[in-house]
Image: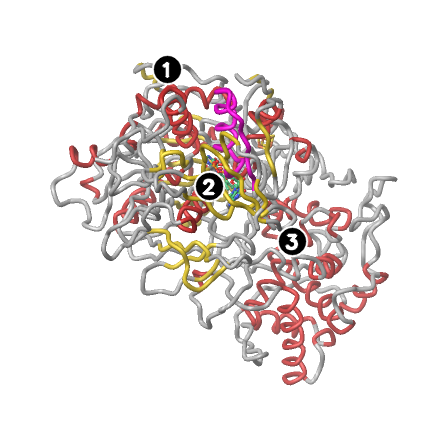
Amino acid sequence: MPINKQPVDVVIIGLGWTGSLIGMEMTDAGLDVVALERGADRTKEDFLYPKPADELKYGVRLGMMQSPRTDGVTIRRNGGETALPQRQWTTFHPGNGVGGCGAHWTGVLYRATPTELSMKSFADATFSPGFLPENMVMQDYGVTYDELEPHFDLFERIAGLSGQAGNLNGEIIDGGNPFEGPRSNPFPLPPLPRTLTDTLFTEATQSLGWHPYPYPSANVSQAYTNPYGMQLGPCNFCGFCSNYGCLNYSKASPQTCVLDALKRRDNFSYRTQCDVRRINKAGDGQTVTGVTYIDGDGNEVFQPAKMVFLCSFTLSNVRLLLLSGIGQPYDPISNTGVVGRNFTYQITGSVDMYFERHQFNPFISAGGSGQVIDDFAPDAFDTEQHGFIGGSYIYTTQGPGGAIGGTRVPPGSPSWGSEWKRNAQREYGHHMMIGTTGSNMAYRDCYLDLDPNYRDPHGDPLLRMTYDWKENDMRMTMFMADRIREIVDELGPDYHTESFHKVGDQFDPSHYQSTHLTGGAVMGTDPQTSVVNRYLQHWDAHNLFVMGASNFPQNMMHNPTGTVAALTFWSVRKIRESYLANPGPLMSRS
Amino acid sequence: MPKNDFQPDRRALLKGSLLMLPAMGTGIGLIATAGADEAPPHIDDYTPTFFSTEEWQFILAATDRLIPEDETGAGALGTNVPIFLDLQLGSEYGSADNWYMEGPFPKGAPAAFGYQLPFTPADLYRYGIAATRRYCQDTYQADFPELEAKRQIEVLSGLENGDIHFAPQQGRELPSATFFSFLLKNTKEGYFADPQYGGNKHMGGWKMLGFTGARASFREWVDQYDRPYPLGPVSLSGERG
Ligand SMILES: Cc1cc2nc3c(=O)[nH]c(=O)nc-3n(C[C@H](O)[C@H](O)[C@H](O)COP(=O)(O)OP(=O)(O)OC[C@H]3O[C@@H](n4cnc5c(N)ncnc54)[C@H](O)[C@@H]3O)c2cc1C
Ligand code: SF4
């Protein structure tokens, strides 16, 4: 018999970025809110210097991540393969514990562009009929950039975003990103100081006629107090950023930006080590009644709630919907159902350059520090003549500085012995990277469902990912590789090595790609092709709201979290304005 | 195959007589070892808890070949890398506590799926060391540590390239290249991880590379382009080098 808890107004599943923001908003609305977090509690004190400066624990053994043993994922590249589990994380690094991925993310904070939010409309208006591959599934988000703008702006003020606006109310500003959507306000803080890699990249891309600008960084450039009264200190380029908690109160995270303010509220509480297993459906077929979880002592607990917010990151969001039987699972053969549909990822590539003449001091690095061009965004040039839809940004960032991950030796040289040592010593600090990160279109045969073979310790099936790289996206990355080669020529390194995918390559999950896992519970205006409506309300259960990048119908070129947070605020505003007074579907199904 | 043109006498190294540490500061109260507040032990004074005596001799000899002491700086033995390996393999890493280790483990999984063997790191070392020693006995009628340096390097290269075949255990074969990749990766981890994990003694690995360890504060250095950073590393426990 499960333990029954007292009913609450709101239960939040997962206390990462979106869960924390929902906590603020729903307590603001005067509701009783409980957040359930599967992992351990983590406060800012856990990140005090020098604890995070431990490459083995965090950078290599991935101390902040969810455990594959308890929350695994299987992967296959097509329906003909048997999916195999990630025994240890290689291709992505999902988070665990209070703060979620938000506690160890990098802090590159972007907005979707107006085009990316309305990709289908853009494609219809721009491309020749029949140009797009038949199995590509393209959708608009169902919300426009103008609708989201105030919410982007709010999250950027919460995070202390540091950088240079490129488009202020339609006016293009030198040194910023001219391809971004119009901003109503300048960045809250100026850009971080520029590293040598930033400066070299700027010179090279300017001489090629492109438009370099500083990464919009949620590693803050100056002391800052955010709208919740939370204080951040200037980033000191500690070199332990992505995959690590910040040791300096400088990286925007639920811990540094939200949680202390939230925990002070009497109508908020949170419980850790509470692994939500099911969202409970009501007998009326239109609502949910709460959630069932296993607590730290192994008890099964039912937490009744008037509203449920699913804030558990793409992988858990989709899996919990499937395990709970809420919404029709997607079937790629019959092309019916919605849960798991439009799973997308990110297309990346990079070069590594060696310069004997430069000393980069690569341990001087911050995750959100870097220099970028958006000249090859999806709507910035005629991609059809190059054979693809989509776009990428091209960037540099200093590092990686860690000793375990940062040694470089010439290609073909030994990886051990004295020659390896001599090369590693000579070349450490003389390498610079340039990378590209691109959009990923959705395809009919790329989706998430439950694995038939592999189970977790509770006996529940693991989430299964069926995903491959497609020709359109590979043509895009080959185009970007050529642009990067032009930058390499400008810079003239002593040598460089390349890591790019090409048409015909299959998805290779044995290497880190990114943790920008998107789709699977997508938003939209048509219940036949989306799990949640444009207010992130579940079409089949009006008191269930799903937050996170699982909402994206296809992935954008830039990092997801700015858009994830803006969508969260967008949803919550509608809930506060309309739903609380009059609970029910916010959009009709027809 | 790696060229090793600096070959200190192996036996002398194993005895520790070539370890060159007096120049490295060990300020009072700033020294760390695995969990304890005392000076890191000399490798000869350490009693392994995970490795058997024979396995330990293999690890000493193999890591010495992988990261030899030479003109670039300390090697695996001088930095206690074998101690790091012993501690890691005896802990949750060795037993793969965090990994998803439920079957089935299909044979011949494409490399793209990453590690798909049923062996924990601890199993894998036991199996790999025994199989390599057996190979040395069969081929050279001698145990790995007794071979000349040149031979040892040949054997390690044979593992690295997968040219050496290990006999199956419980119906499963460990590819020798997989064993080697764990051995090399973990050896480098021990050389470059914070000294609190038992290796990188007196930050010898970091000094070899020019890494600053846990200094982690460089704001005023960001725009000092092309200037070598002047300070040595610090460890998590505050040891300075
Ligand atoms: C290494 C890394 C670098 C990144 N860098 C960037 C970047 O530079 N820019 C960017 O925009 N994005 C980046 N991201 C992605 C970013 O972190 C996420 O987009 C963001 O955190 C998403 O917020 P979320 O609330 O959806 O999920 P999270 O912040 O991950 O929070 C989800 C929470 O739910 C919990 N949970 C999951 N399942 C359950 C369950 N069943 N029961 C209870 N709790 C559960 C998890 O433990 C977690 O705490 C990065 C991610 C990683 C891993
Ligand atoms: S680089 Fe800056 S933001 Fe990142 S962890 Fe270090 S101090 Fe924090």
Residue at the (61%, 50%) spot, across then down: A61
Q: Are marks 1 and 3 on the same chain?
A: no
**Chain at numbered mark 3:** B
Does dot 3 land on a helix, a strand or a loop?
helix
**Chain at numbered mark 1:** A
Mark earlier in primary sequence (2, 1) = 1
Q: Amino acid at mark 1?
A: Ser
Label 3, on which residue?
B189
**Image region (quadrant) for ligand 2:** top right
Q: Which residues are magenta?
A: A13-37
Q: Which mark is residue A313?
A: 2
Does A354 sit left or right of A234 as displayed? left
Does A389 sit left or right of B82 as displayed? left
Residue B163 against residue A18 in the figure, above or below: below
Label 2 CB, ligand 1: below 8 Å? yes
Quarter the C terminus of chain A occupies: top left
Label 1, on which residue?
A184
Can residue B120 be found in the magenta stretch?
no
* Distance in Å between CA atoms under marks 2 and 1: 29 Å
Q: From the top left corner, tell me how far across and down residue A514 is, in percent.
A: 45, 44
Residue A130 against residue B69 in the figure, above or below: above
Q: Tell me which corner region of the image, top left, top right, bottom left or bottom right, holds residue A580.
A: top left
Q: Amino acid at mark 2?
A: Phe
Q: Are marks 2 and 1 on the same chain?
A: yes
* Distance in Å between CA atoms under marks 1 and 3: 48 Å
